[in-house]
Amino acid sequence: MQDIVIRKSIESDLNSILEIYNQGIEDRIATLEVETKNYSYIMSWNENHKGRFSVIVAEIEGKVVGWASLNQYNNRSAYGGVADLSVYISRDYRGQGVGQKLLANLETLAKENGFHKIILFTFPFNQLGQGLYKKMGFRVVGVFENQGILDGEFVDVMAMEKLL
């Protein structure tokens, strides 16, 4: 496996971030979103990911192959130390250690930005994702039954957390 470089995202990464996010939407394994997004959407999304709510990317030989972000969990001040996370890996690089490296760096970034806990929501059928999260020390909190609708069918959503 080639060297994976993790760094903070820059504006020129947005096309790659968008492409990888849209793969996650199309593949129906990572989000309840059903419609692919456009560049205007990702520009607005990026504006909400400044400061504590950062985005990092994984590069292999100069190509962005994955990204991860810390997202606001809740705007109430009581939840200021809790971040939600997103991790998306390009189809061709899934299962090759990119997600693990992104998560490790995201945890460091979370600690540096005053977070004491990271939460995430995943599909119970996303075994690859769950394996990664469990390997990185996340624990299952529970499953929300029929939490959303994906392609006309109810889908369960699993909540996981890690104390930092």
Image: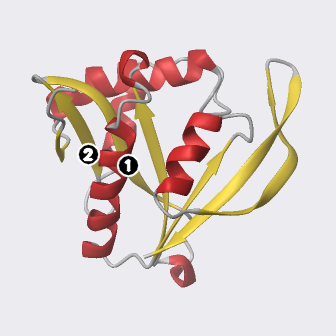
Label pair 2/1, CB-CB below 8 angstroms? yes
Residue type at numbered disc 1: Ser
The x, y position of residue 161, in whole percent, is 59, 66
Q: How is the image coloured?
A: secondary structure
Q: Quadrant of residue 75?
A: bottom right
Q: Is residue 146 left or right of residue 92?
A: right
Q: Is residue 47 left or right of residue 72?
A: left
- Residue displayed at 43% across by 26% down: 94
- Residue 48 appears in the rendering: no
Residue type at numbered disc 2: Ile
Estimate how packed mark 2 is, as few (under 14), some (14 to 19) or many (20 or more) residues with alpha carbons within 10 Å.
many
Mark 1 — residue?
Answer: 69
| Disc 1, SS | strand
- Residue displayed at 56% across by 55% down: 134
- Residue displayed at 27% across by 20% down: 15
| Disc 2, SS | strand
The x, y position of residue 39, in whole percent, is 35, 20
Please state which of residues 32 and 106 is positioned toward the viewer in this rendering. Answer: 106
Sequence-wise, the earlier of marks 2 and 1 is 2
- The answer for how far apart the CA atoms under marks 2 and 1 are is 6 Å
Q: Could you say which disc has been placed on residue 33 in the image? A: none
Tally the marks: 2
Mark 2 — residue?
Answer: 56
The x, y position of residue 37, in whole percent, is 48, 21
